[in-house]
Image (tube, rainbow, N blue to C red):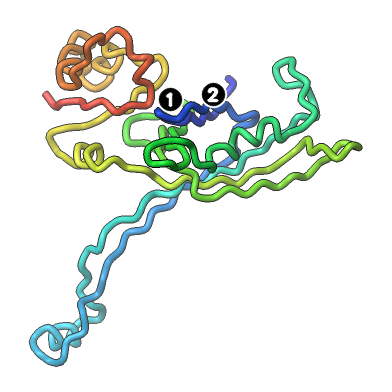
Amino acid sequence: MTLEKLKIVAQPPSRLGEIEVLFNPTAYSISKSVTWNPPENSNGGEQSKTQRALNAPILTFGGGDSRQLTLELMFDVTESINGRIIDDVRQETNKILALTRIERLEPPRPPTCLIFWGNSPPNSDFPFKGVVSSLTQNFTLFKSNGNPVRANLAITFTEFLDPQDDKRQTDPELTTRILKPGDTLSSIAAEVYRDPRRWRIIAEANRLDDPRNLQSKIGERLTIPKL
């Protein structure tokens, strides 16, 4: 069975199109660091006595950093791609490069992206929402005229979290779901409630005017109330 291609989708108000990679990565990595701080130095007192009696200082939570998704992508146009003849691999890699460029948004900035790969269970690595924080392009094969036809790209996305969405995710009374192509409220209700007939609960919680038309909301996060 052929594995579904990884897709990178720039989110509105960006006007960039969907990018489907030519070859899926053979591996990916996700990293996240969490800050824990030792207590501030104090001159004497009970706190200092307590610290000296321990093998390690008492730590306090200092906050979490954004997750980092790193992908190694190969682009090769030495053969036709879906019947298309491409004589310069930059026709494909420039689509990735565009994700690093400032657009006329408000405020002006590069686009926020959603990265989809396969049908992942809830709370998995994908879809991953983030912005490009690093891109390295390495061109490795060239035609006689100098045009590159093969490239390896190392791209890192830094997680982009909306504060309200993040709060909903950590609220024990709520869960959330990012809409993917092909999703319907019935299919989501069947997955989370084990009953497709309960789709109205989701529609009402998200104030959906037309719950049958979700294609315009692909990439948005739905609130899924607990029963």
Query: Is 58 or 127 nearer to us in this picture?
Result: 127
Q: Is residue 105 left or right of residue 154?
A: left
Q: Which mark is residue 179?
A: none
Residue drawn at the location 8% of the way across and 86% of the way down = 46
Question: Please, is residue 54 above or below residue 93 in the view?
Answer: below
Q: Is residue 188 left or right of residue 58?
A: right
Q: Is residue 116 visible?
A: no
Residue drawn at the location 26% of the way across and 70% of the way down = 37
Work out which quarter of the rendered image holds the N terminus and state it: top right
Residue 121 rendering spot, x and y as whole percentages: 36, 29
Crowd class of label 1 (few under 14; some 14 to 19; many from 20; radius 10 Å): few
Work out which quarter of the rendered image holds the C terminus and state it: top left
Residue 177 rendering spot, x and y as whole percentages: 29, 28
Callout 1 secondary element: loop
The amino acid sitting under disc 1 is Asn
- Residue for badge 2: 4
Residue 153 rendering spot, x and y as whole percentages: 64, 43
Query: In the orientation shown, which residue stands out farthest toward the left?
Result: 46
**Mark 1–mark 2 contact, CB under 8 Å?**
yes
Query: In the orientation shown, which residue stands out farthest toward the bottom?
Result: 44
The amino acid sitting under disc 2 is Glu
Residue drawn at the location 9% of the way across and 89% of the way down = 45
- Residue for badge 1: 119
Q: Sequence-wise, which precedes: disc 1 or disc 2?
A: 2
Q: Is residue 62 visible?
A: yes
Q: Quadrant of the rendered structure where residue 210 is?
A: top left
